[in-house]
Amino acid sequence: MFGLKRRCYNALIARGIFYLLMIASAIKPVLLLADSNKHFNLGAGKYKMVLSNNIASDDEFTGYVLSAQYAYTDNVAARISFYITEEENYMQFDNDGLEMLALFGSGLYTEGFKIYIGAGYFSEDWQLTTLSASHNGLMLSGGIGYNWKIISVDLILGIREVGDYQDLADQVNPYLEIDKSTSTSILLSARF
């Protein structure tokens, strides 16, 4: 069942990327008339979230991410990312969620190197055949990357609140403590 579900998610992501690129290419001429700087990034990439605990090995969720970013200035931007991941080691949870971040840094819309930090919110839903849970909270993020004329590459690291994860862990095993929750993504984006 999970294999079929994963293929459906992969097809959904591929379709989403195609539609995002089609919309972006349709609005590009309008944006170029308004401003020579490229404020919009639409991208996709790999996503990994890790929950570290005090008893067992880490729970690792891996999958894909779609991201949209708007840079208000070269130093301030907002990003929203949608991700679909799966934990494959133990119970095969599906984990779908989003991150919304305010970014502060340098080089966010000009060509060349960029570096930034951010703060924001995450919300996700875990699904298993017999169990579902929702997690949300605050997160801090940082990233580095490079902007070329029409594409951009980013490596993003995040650390999250563990409160909701700990609530679930307490229900499963009262001795289990979630030490930290981190996320990593690498994005390839089109710039508009």
Image (spheres, rainbow, N blue to C red):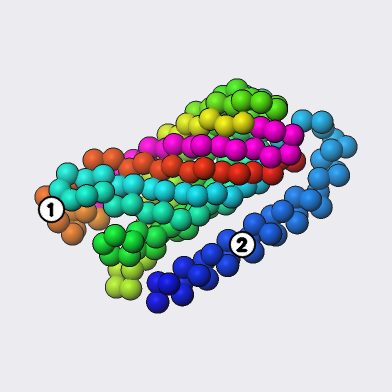
Above/below status of 188 relative to 91: above
Residue at 82%, 31% in the rendered image:
36
Give coordinates of residue 67: x percent, y percent. Answer: 58, 47
Label 1–label 2 contact, CB within 8 A: no
Q: Which residues are magenta?
A: 147-167
Above/below status of 78 relative to 63: above
Give coordinates of residue 22: x percent, y percent. Answer: 75, 56
Residue at 75%, 54% in the rendered image:
23
User: Would residue 138 be counted in the magenta stretch?
Assistant: no
Split into 4 quadrants, where in the image is the C terminus?
Answer: top right
Nearest the viewer among 115 and 125 is 115
Give coordinates of residue 55: x percent, y percent. Answer: 15, 48
Residue at mark 2: 14
Report helix, strand or loop for mark 1.
loop
Residue at 70%, 33% in the rendered image:
148
- Which of the labelled discs sits on residue 174, or is there none? 1
- Which of the labelled discs sits on residue 54, or is there none? none
Question: What's the distance in space between the residues labelled 1 and 2, CA to CA?
Answer: 41 Å
Give coordinates of residue 2: x percent, y percent. Answer: 40, 72
> What residue type is disc 1 on?
Pro
In the image, taking residue 40 as reference, residue 157 lies left or right, namely left
Report helix, strand or loop for mark 2.
helix
Nearest the viewer among 142 and 10 is 10
Q: Can residue 133 be seen here?
A: no
Residue at 24%, 40% in the rendered image:
179
Q: Residues within 10 Å of mark 2 (few under 14, many from 20)?
A: some
In the image, taking residue 184 as reference, residue 93 lies left or right, namely left
